[in-house]
Structure formats: structure tokens, C-alpha cells
Amino acid sequence: MKKKLSPGFLLDIFFESLLALRDNRLRTILSILGITVGIAAVMTVGTVSKGGHFIIFSELETFGLKSVWVYRDQADKDPHRAVRAGTGIENADYAAIRAAGCPALRLLSPVVYGRRDKMLVRYGNKYGNGQINGVGADYLEINNDTLMYGRSFREEDISRNRQVAIIGTDVQRDLFGPLSNPVGRDIRIGERKFTVIGVLAAKSRDFLASIGSSGGQDANNRLLVPYTVFQQMTGFKDINFLQAEAISLPDADTAVSQIIRILKRHHSDRFTYKSGTMAQYIRTTENILKWVTFIGVVAASVSLFVGGMGIMNIMSTSVLERTREIGLRKALGASRKEILIQFLLEAILISFIGGILGLILGILAGYSLAFFSHIPLEPSWPMVLVSMAVSIGVGLLSGYYPAHHAAGLKPVEAFRFE
């Protein structure tokens, strides 16, 4: 008949385990330290990964998460296709796509830019250099731009070729000062006079710029004007590319195919087109972040492995030192299961205490990094649960062999052990 383990017995075993760990303080502390460092490392990796995810996606949002771009493929190498000048996108194409009512498309805007990267802009005796783009009325909403002052473009601004402009915060600072509201004032872009109708709120793309993925444009140094006016200024009749917003992220590829289908039909398939979607960037970014996090966790887990080896070492040593005690307990009626549970519990206690200390250290490390880097870093709570589960698992796995060995000792052999 199997002996049942009563709650009182389990409580006695718990306190005996604590006493055994106390009697070997130095070894216990070193083993706990190994687990603490491992869990803290895993926690820190999770926190930094979560913070990196937040930074990257907050900057990707500045492009509009449902944005798509369509432009001519200038690298078309088909030898049977005549080389044709132009971008393959005209004002009539833009009108045709809007009239077609593409089901996957919510908003659409032309984007026209000049040959020069920047244009001289002046207000009184103050000068600046802004990156000028001609855009449509929906551009700000597609591009997830917000206004600090003023209003967006209206359809009548586009159709009536009104000389109005929306400027970025860098242009505002250069011409008017950072705290001045320039709405209603006239500036000169080249030789033309424009009335400022809005100021764009600042955008941060510092991280994407540092890895060369900011789109090659300073978001805060922009000058936006109606695309029809910019075409008049430059004598350029085409549209460089179309930027649109799909009705949802899953519909981004469908929106692109609908736009390209109309463009090809409109030009009798004389041009080929390329496209880009934020959905593609998001998928790529998520895959990269997953792998980076995985590699970081694996690297941090090495210290957990070392900690586990430490627990196995201390428990094996403990079994050797307490061989006579084990023999005496078994002679007095202690079962194999009771001995096994006691030594397993000691290993679990070491890993659990180390896990708790590691979590505290990892959380403090995350908040310290956030304080010094000014990056919002918060603990990854799923990683907290995983870390604790791993910590207890390490204790079980590391303590099982010594516990199994202790439970298998025979009383006679234990008494003979020197």
C-alpha cells in the first residue's frame, strides 16, 4: 500500500530543505546567483526587444501603416518593348483611378517632386531649404501627417491651382521661429509667392534614418504644395508616383493590383510598374525582430544553463555529504518518494529564489535603461511568466538526477559510506 504524502509532511520537508540550504550558505548563494543572472539576462533581452518593437513601429506609423506606393519600373529590360519617356503616370490616370472606385482603395494622392532635392524658401530676410513635394488633398491623411497649425489641402486648392503651402517644423523654425504661428503669412518658394495654410506636426524617424530606411526624406523639412501648382512651377506634366491608403492592411496588395491594372489599361500596357506597401515592411520588420529576440534569448539562456549546472553540482555534493543521513532516514521508514521530493524541493527552492531575484534585477535593469536612454522600456510580462517557468524547470531538471540518486541509495550501503 502506497504511503500518502500529508500536508504536514510536505511542510516538514519544506522547512528541512530550507535548513539544508542554510547549512551550505556559500554554495547555495552561488547557485542562486547563477540563476539570478540568467533570468535577469532573459528579462532584459525581452524588455529591450519590446522597446525596440515600439520604437520601430511608432516610426513606421509616420508613413501610414496602410500606405501603398505605385511607380513606373524604370529598369524594364523587355527587348520587345519600346523605351518610352515619362513616369507612366499622368493626371488623367489619377482621375481615372479615382473614377473607377477601386474597392480595396480608400484614399489616393499623386506625389510630384523636382529634380533638385531642396528648394530655397524665403520669408522677408530669412532663408531656408525645404524638400518640396506636390501632393493631392488626401496626402496628409494617407501619410499619417497631423497639423500643429492650420488646415490641410482642399480639392478646390488643387483644382484651382491655389498657391498655398504646408510647411514642416524645420522650415517653420528657420523662417518664423519655433513658437510662431505662420498660418496666413506669405513665403517665397523660388520666385513664386505662397500662403502658408498649415504647419505639420514633428515626426521622428531617427532610428529608421540611422539604418537608411527613412525613405530618403527629412519628414520635418518638407514643403507641400498642390501637385498641379508644382507641375506649373517645374513644367513637369507627369506624376512621379501614386501614394494610396488601402481599406485595411490585408487589402494592401489588392489595392496595388487594382491601381496597376488601371494604369496598364490606360496606357495600353506600354509601361511596367512596381509597388511597395507598408504591409511588406511590417511583415519584414516583425520577422527580423522575432529572430533578433530569439537569438538574444538563446544567448541569455546560456547563463541559465550554467546556473542549472551549478544547481546540479551543489545537489550532487549535498547528496554525498548527507549519505549517512539518507541511510538513517530510510532505515527509519522514509520512502523512496519522500527522499526524492526532499532533494527536488531543495533544487526548486534554489531556482525559485534565483528566479524572483532575477526578475527584480531584470525589471530594474529595464527601467534604468529607459531612464538613461529616454526610450520607453517596460517589462515584457509574458517574458516574466516564461522566465519563472524556465527557472522552476531548470530547478527540476538540474535537481532530478541528484534526487533520484539519493532516493535510490540502500540503507546498508549508505551506512558504509565514508
Image: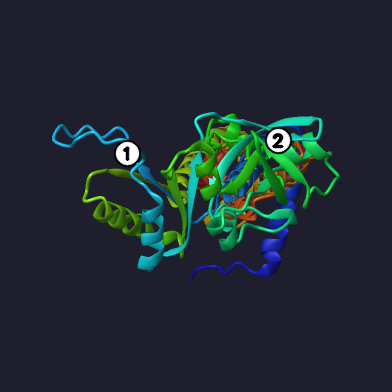
What residue do we see at 63% from left, 49% from top? 163
Question: SS of the residue at dot 2?
Answer: helix
Question: Which residue position holds label 2?
Answer: 33
As drawn, the label of residue 305 is none
Pick whichever of labels 1 and 2 is earlier in the sequence.
2
The answer to whether the residue labelled 1 contacts the one labelled 2, judged by CB atoms less than 8 Å apart, is no
**409 lies left or right of 350:** left
Question: SS of the residue at dot 1?
Answer: loop
The image shows residue 161, relative to residue 415, as above or below, that is: below
Q: Residue furthest right?
A: 179
Residue 180 at x, y percent in the picture: 85, 45
Quadrant, the C terminus? top right
Q: Is residue 102 visible?
A: no
| Quadrant housing residue 219 | top right
| Quadrant housing residue 78 | top left
Q: Residue furthest left?
A: 80
What amino acid is labelled 1 in the image?
Asp
What residue do we see at 74% from left, 36% from top? 29
What residue do we see at 31% from left, 53% from top? 263
**178 lies left or right of 203:** right
Question: Which residue position holds label 1?
Answer: 73
**29 lies left or right of 338:** right
Residue 5 at x, y percent in the picture: 60, 67
